[in-house]
Amino acid sequence: MPVVLPPGAGYLGKSRRRISASGLVTWERCPRQWHYRRRIGLNDAIVPEMIIGLVVEDALCGLYMERFSSDKPTPIVSTWVNHSRQGDGLQKIESSAELQISDIDSINEWLEIVLPTLVGEVQRLLKKKWDESPWKSNQRDISEVDDKRIENLLRGGINLQIEEVQNCFNNEGGPYLDQFRESGDPFTIPAPCWDENPAKPGEYKSRTAGKGFKSGSITAWEAWEIARPWVKDPRILEPQRLFHPDGWAAGELDLVHRWDGTVRICDIKASAGTSGYSVGLVNQLRFYQWLWSITRTHSGRPKGGINGGELSRLEGWYLVGPHRKIVDILDEKTLGEESSKWKNIHQQMTLSGLHPTHMAPADPSPWIKHQPGGKPLAVDDEKAAKKLTCERCTAVAFCDGSPEVIRKIAQSSITPPEMGNFENLVKDLVPKPPCTLISNIPRRLNVKGEIKGHWGPLPNHYGEDVRGATIVVGNTSVVIEEMGADSFGQIPSSGEFAMLDVAPGLWRGMTRLYLDEHSDIRNIGDTPDVEFTRLGLIPTKANLSGQVVSRGRNSGVNSTGKPWAMSTCHLWDGESIVEVVAFGSAINRTFQQIKVGDRVRILSAELGWRDGVPQVRINPRNTRIEVKTA
Ligand code: SF4
């Protein structure tokens, strides 16, 4: 639920530096796994389950945003389906039938009739996402996801919401019936509805009471309106999240129910909750409880409306079943202790990967199976259960903490047959000049000079607002810039200074020095034993070679409305892994066609940084990419 724009809102407000509920859950599964997945962005080959949950959740939230006609029959067409189709330039679906909403059965009937079009749209989006993905599992295909499976998930979400509507109806609309009848949704941040204008984060938009509100006993139409949960509004591009006032944590809620005078935070899961991943739900929801509690008095919250009451419960909505898992909220003292733990985890996260030898510990949690509805089963053999966690890990082939037997299986799966064995592959991957080991990429250095030309915050290439300046010695000047939004803070406006632990790089042909929370600016007199690099000798390029072990892509529209796109691959040189990124026009045919398993040489790539770890970037004019197809 939106509070305000994120501190230093970047491209869609995402930052690998903030701790999120899913990042926390990954860390608790294994800190080293978090390092590989979140810090350096190593992906898994896509399987249908990775996208089904996202699309089904969008479809359900779009359905909860419907408003029925009250005085005439309602056309049977999903507004979300048409919104989604129009976003891809497709024609709207016209309604060929209509239904009068008179009771909860008729709401159910309307939803049941509209369901096939939702299934169709979910399938279209799944196929599109699948086709666009640069790395798919060889053993899986999106065509195996049949309509029945999607229908079952959607019907699970419909049934759970209809339970809310029925309860609301049975309770005469709850304590806010009069406010709804008088002036519509009374909350400070109203529940998005297709018939009402969207409210951006931080914005207050009062509502008008829909025409269907009456007097006397509550109607089913009114119960649907009042029981509508807050969901992420698909019409808004800005991030709709809870941001910690200090910016180091953020969370995106699925549903917030408020009709009964209390607040319930619910998370949708497109499963029955039987897998080991279900273990993360409790902490995920309690992380939201904490973010909710610390943002209620945030000065950036819009004024007006009512707050919706105290948080009473946390719920997991498992769509297969469906099941409603109730998670008790933590008392204030325990929540305080938990949040100190999360702060500490966040500090450990910022250090992981800062130096090549420092990675978060390899410490897998046991894989815990569950009964339907997310009820955990006892673990008899903890060692075997930890092995199951490693077996499912993205990094099992590269992690020295993984059990040897499964590491060897994973390593043989990435070894081309002509190499014979994994040891031969590692030997063959040793870079030959001019390429160097990834671990030899220059990380941090110290410079001194006069700081001039203070600017910012101005957008960097990720669209994040960063501060910058130049450092000058004689005729040589170099740009200094924050690595990401708010990653360093104020830079002195002028004067002679020493800059310690800054990261060297290049962007748009200009040498840059990136500052983050590990960098320091001091008076030159305070650095007697420091070794400095001359500004003219700052390393800015990298020549690397290795085997491609992951592919990814991302695109969207930034907060100024400008589209952006990036394509990534991860290169492994037998020892370390680094992310290689092409932005916008640098995503050429050669880069697009790179596959996992290919051997690649990248010459004269630009050295960049993302949240404290190196990121090698393709310059469309100067970088040479040589690919030996697997
Ligand atoms: S292989 Fe196991 S120990 Fe290593 S990162 Fe993955 S889960 Fe952690």
Image (cartoon, rainbow, N blue to C red):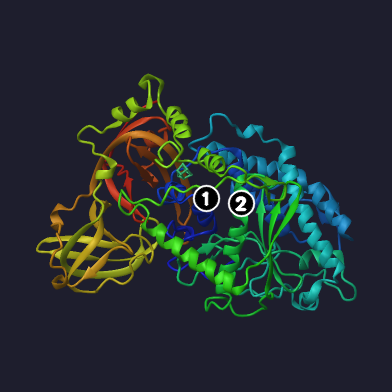
> Does residue 547 lie above or below 159 as drawn?
above
In the picture, measured across the screen, residue 470 lies left or right of residue 205, that is left
Q: Nearer the viewer, residue 111 or 269?
A: 269
Does any portion of residue 100 appear in the rendered image? no
Q: Amino acid at mark 2?
A: Val
- x and y percentages locating residue 89 in the rendered image: 59, 46
> Does residue 492 lie above or below 564 as drawn?
below
- x and y percentages locating residue 451 in the rendered image: 19, 69
Q: Quick check: is the Cβ at mark 2 less than 8 Å away from ligand 1?
A: no
Quadrant of the drawing holding the C terminus: top left
Q: Which mark is residue 347?
A: none
Of the residues under marks 1 and 2, which one precedes in the sequence?
Answer: 1
How many marks do you count on the picture?
2
Q: Nearer the viewer, residue 241 or 564?
A: 241
Decide: few, some or many residues near mark 2? Use Cα within 10 Å; few <14, some 14-19, many ≥20. Answer: many
- x and y percentages locating residue 41 in the rendered image: 43, 47
Q: Amino acid at mark 1?
A: Arg
Tag 1–tag 2 contact (CB < 8 Å): yes
Marks 1/2: CA–CA distance = 9 Å
Decide: few, some or many residues near mark 1? Use Cα within 10 Å; few <14, some 14-19, many ≥20. Answer: many
Identify which residue is drawn at 78% across, 48% down.
Answer: 114
- x and y percentages locating residue 573 in the rendered image: 32, 36
**Secondary structure at numbered mark 2:** helix
Q: Quick check: is the Cβ at mark 1 less than 8 Å away from ligand 1?
A: yes
Does any portion of residue 290 appear in the rendered image? yes
Identify which residue is drawn at 28% across, 38% down.
Answer: 544
Q: Which mark is residue 29?
A: 1
Quadrant of the drawing holding the N terminus: bottom right
**Secondary structure at numbered mark 1:** helix
Identify which residue is drawn at 80% across, 73% down.
Answer: 174
Task: Place residue 425 in its image quadrant.
Answer: top left
Residue topped by disc 2: 279
